[in-house]
Image: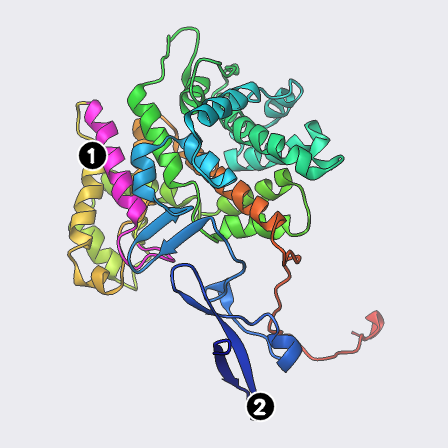
């Protein structure tokens, strides 16, 4: 049998056979790589919602069934049985580490966790109320100036060191941002703390509070970072791959990912949920009124944390995030009004025909903000935490592109709707 093809009939009657591809999970796609050269046509797909930009082995999503897997492992299985370092290793290197590999990786991350002393001056130059994502993107891009060996000699010899440095130093950058925002001296990473415990200690320790990272908070942070570690070709990951396709270095590509994540429709979504819940509580709006207003197309109110571009059922990460949230809050031995409001909204919305018919279910952002809030992390740092979690996925996609045999620079086409040819009128005659 010959290759399976889709038939495209053009307006002039010509017929073109387009190869049909079948992926690992049986999903079909139409290969249009030769479409323009053979027909003169391009496709029009705003937002690229129907366009596969690459072949990838990293992440699998089934939005209709609510499935999310990293390298073939179900997200719940990873959250229950691995820490963030193991999942980062999995995404970057393609397999889960052995115990010896896990210990060695932890040691490498600790070894490279310190920042160049001159980078500290950068933090001090930023306003204390500067947006953390602006600082994060700038500091990540600056790493290439302080650690330039990525640009020297054979890039393959240096990429593993660069990856390890970035995974470790971005955590230190994030913690130092928090300290700068609050007018506090920086706390150095400690060799005897795990990846997540180190981050919390660098944020919250001071000489007068005798802070010790709470094991439950360390566990919750590990799990939340795993939930955010990758999500296929989302906006920020696509930005990383696009910038990487120009052969920009890893630091530059990840800085671009940080900038893409910054937006309220992407990494800022959990902050929007917290703002919404706080407004509901402050204004004394009943959950029935919240649901009514969310369904009113003439009302400017929007129910943040519901619905997803990909998932048409309950976001599998949201179920886990809800469980984590309850575990963290249970330790506080007091009810959290924000969680109570969130649970009431979820209960009403998931049993309302309006939301069911439109596949509007809680997504991961609906609960993560409440958990970070309970851990003492300010809202302004939420997107930074998202970036820290997504970093292994960004790195994995950057590395995957580097070994992609297609490896062309990303260069989408457009459908031009501007004016036809015009002549310039001399300025004195306009």
Percent x, y for residue 317? 31, 45
Of helix, strand and loop, which mostly describes the magenta segment?
A: helix
Give residue 6's position: percent from left, percent from top.
Answer: 48, 79
The answer to whether residue 114 is visible is yes
Q: Residue at x 39, y 47 (%)?
A: 72
- Give left or right: position of 371 versus 414: left
Q: Is 357 in the magenta? A: no
Instruction: Residue 152: name its quadrant.
Output: top right
Query: Mark 1 highlights which residue?
Result: 337
* Residue 360: % across, % down: 27, 57
Numbered badge on residue 14: 2
User: Hey, which residue is sitting farthest bottom in the picture?
Assistant: 13
Residue 180 appears in view: no
Would you call the spot at circle 1 few (<14 residues within 10 Å), some (14-19), or many (20 or more)?
A: few
Magenta stretch? 307-332
Q: Quadrant of the C terminus?
A: bottom right
- The residue sitting at 53% across, 77% down in the picture is 18
Which callout, 1 or 2, points at the residue further toward the start of the chain? Answer: 2
Viewer-nearest of discs 1 and 2? 2
Residue 328: in magenta span: yes
């Amino acid at each position: 049998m010959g290759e399976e093809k889709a038939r495209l009939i053009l307006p002039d009657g010509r017929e073109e056979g387009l190869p049909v591809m079948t992926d690992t999970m049986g999903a079909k796609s139409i290969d249009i790589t030769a479409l323009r050269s053979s027909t003169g046509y391009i496709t029009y797909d705003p937002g690229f919602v129907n366009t596969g930009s690459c072949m990838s082995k990293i992440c699998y999503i089934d939005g209709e069934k609510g499935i999310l897997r990293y390298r073939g492992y179900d997200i719940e299985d990873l959250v229950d049985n691995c820490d963030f370092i193991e999942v980062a290793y999995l995404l970057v290197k393609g397999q889960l580490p052995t115990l010896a590999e896990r210990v060695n990786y932890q040691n490498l991350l600790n070894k490279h966790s310190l920042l160049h002393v001159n980078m500290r001056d950068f933090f001090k130059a930023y306003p204390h109320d500067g947006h953390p994502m602006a600082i994060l993107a700038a500091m990540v891009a600056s790493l290439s100036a302080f650690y330039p060996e990525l640009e020297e000699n054979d890039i393959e010899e240096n990429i593993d060191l660069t990856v390890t440095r970035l995974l470790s130093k971005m955590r230190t950058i994030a913690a130092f941002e928090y300290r700068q925002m609050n007018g506090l001296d920086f706390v150095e990473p400690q060799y005897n703390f795990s990846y997540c415990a180190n981050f919390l200690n660098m944020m919250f320790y001071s000489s007068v509070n005798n802070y010790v990272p709470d094991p439950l908070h360390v566990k919750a942070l590990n799990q939340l970072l795993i939930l955010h570690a990758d999500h296929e070709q989302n906006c920020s990951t696509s930005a990383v791959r696009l910038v990487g396709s120009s052969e920009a270095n890893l630091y530059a590509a990840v800085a671009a990912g940080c900038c893409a994540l910054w937006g309220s429709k992407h990494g800022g979504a959990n902050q929007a949920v917290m703002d919404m819940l706080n407004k509901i509580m402050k204004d004394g709006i009943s959950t029935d009124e919240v649901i009514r207003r969310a369904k009113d197309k003439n009302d400017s109110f929007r129910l943040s944390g519901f619905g997803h571009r990909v998932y048409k059922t309950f976001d599998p990460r949201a179920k886990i995030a809800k469980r984590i949230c309850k575990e963290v809050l249970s330790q506080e031995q007091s009810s959290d009004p924000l969680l109570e409001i969130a649970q009431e909204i979820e209960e009403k919305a998931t049993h309302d025909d309006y939301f069911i018919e439109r596949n509007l279910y809680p997504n991961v952002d609906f609960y993560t903000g409440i958990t970070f809030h309970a851990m003492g992390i300010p809202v302004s740092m939420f997107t930074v935490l998202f970036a820290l979690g997504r970093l292994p996925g960004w790195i994995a996609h950057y590395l995957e592109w580097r070994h992609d045999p297609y490896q062309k620079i990303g260069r989408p086409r457009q459908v031009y709707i501007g004016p036809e040819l015009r002549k310039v009128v001399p300025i004195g005659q306009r």
